[in-house]
Image (cartoon, rainbow, N blue to C red):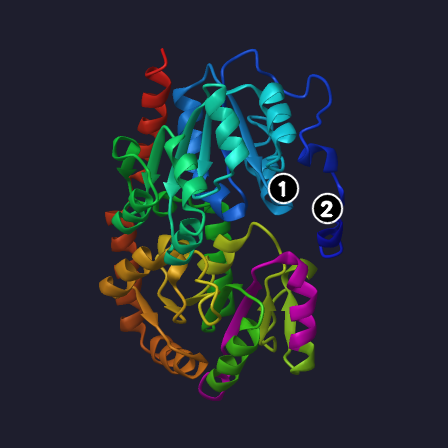
Amino acid sequence: MWWRSFKDSRYRQRWLERLAFYPAGNFDNSKPVIVFHAVSVGELHAAVPLIHACQQALPEWTFTVTTTTVTGSARVKEIFSDSVQHCYMPYDSPGSVKRFLRAVKPKILVILETELWPNLLFYCHQQKCKLLLLNARLSPKSFLNYQKYAGLTSAMLKSLDVVAAQFEQDAKHFRVLGTPENVLHITGTMKFDQEVDQEQLTAGLAMNQELQRPILVAGSTREGEEEKVLAAFRVLLKSLPELLLILIPRHPDRFKKVANLLSDQGYIFVQRSSQEKVSADKQILLGDSLGEMQFYYASADLAFVGGSLVNTGCQNIIEPAVLGLPIVTGPSLFNFKAVSDLLINSGAMQLATNEQEFAEKTLVILQDKNLRQNMADAAGATVAENRGATEKQKQLILQAIHSDQ
């Protein structure tokens, strides 16, 4: 934690909470408690519609939302204010987990995606806290890693009361690892049900209209990827000198490093954090702000989703699709394999094998308004066809609660 705090000073705060030492009276457990654990911002945003739906369906329950990252923690407070309790999920030592359970007293623990920790699952199961793994996914890489510890993995999975896999391939992986068939469901991904922030949507569309120039957004770029995006951008400027690139690094601790990279390469850019307007001479808007991804995507004509030109498995390609945006990615898509197949097959997304092909495909799309519209329509249709996972998983939570009554 100390080492990590050199990149983000917020990691020096609330250390006792990481070990489940809390002030007296920190939690209200006078009513039954349901805990949602979302490790970071992506998992949290996917869970927001589900948590809101459950709050309406279960007004007599207390809601606690836990995260692991400081960015996730900040977003919980911004989104839910005082309507939920919040703390970090403690480290997975027996003492920390038992202190957490004594303080919070959950009757239901909902884990988002695949945050499986042996002590947490063991002691929850021992204390008869229902365990639900929702929006669950297992990429081929994660599947192989869990297989290395098959005995421990199987024991963890057998303690779960519900597993809601996103797609058939995820369900197959869970079966092989030992998940009992009677707890396994296939529901799709809640990321297709993501709530649109109307304020951000309006602001993004307004910026697009105001600037009257083609806009390419590169969202959630990873270490080593900005150089590739900028190499493609330099090629694009030869044919589209008025093109604006909105570049949003994945992690806040890299904002300064990417700003230095843009300076070193001689680009004329403006940082979002400065609140300065994007004037006609600016080539790049550096998205160094948090919680504004929908604003950035809404302002663009075409989206590139990061993590795909480096081998990190791509970030959330559903985010731009929900806003009806054409998408281009690199070849590394293992984190969203099933979703990428849906978007590619529908015509909403094109795949580029390297930065040169990325520049070529981007140029064609930006210069062809009809193609952009067709891709946008396909994105919207794909999202519409795959909505509904949130409602299915809400019903699984309600069934788990009613089976106890």
* 203, above or below 333, in the image: above
* Label 2 close to label 1 by CB (< 8 Å): yes
Q: Amino acid at mark 2?
A: Arg
**Residue 231 placement (x, y as % from top left):** 52, 82
Image quadrant assignment for residue 273: bottom right
Instruction: Identify the residue at horizontal 30%, vertical 31% (top origin).
Output: 183
**Residue 342 placement (x, y as % from top left):** 26, 58
* 391, above or below 403, in the image: below
Q: Residues within 10 Å of mark 1 (few under 14, many from 20)?
A: some
User: Left or right: where does residue 205 sit relative to residue 375?
Assistant: right
Residue segment shown in magenta: 237-262
Give the camera-side residue of 248 and 137.
137
Please say whether residue 247 is one of the residues in the magenta stretch.
yes
Give the camera-side residue of 17 and 145.
145
Give the camera-side residue of 28 and 101.
101
**Mark 2 or mark 1: which is in front?**
2
Task: Identify the mark at residue 74; answer none if there is no mark.
Answer: 1
Res 372 seen here: yes
* 6, above or below 89, in the image: below
Instruction: Identify the residue at horizontal 40%, vertical 44% (top origin).
Output: 194
Label 1 secondary element: helix
Give the camera-side residue of 248 and 121.
121
Instruction: Identify the residue at horizontal 23%, vertical 62% (top origin).
Output: 346
Please say whether residue 59 is one of the residues in the magenta stretch.
no
* 91, above or below 348, in the image: above
Instruction: Identify the residue at horizontal 41%, vertical 35% (top origin).
Output: 155
* Residue pointed to by mark 2: 10
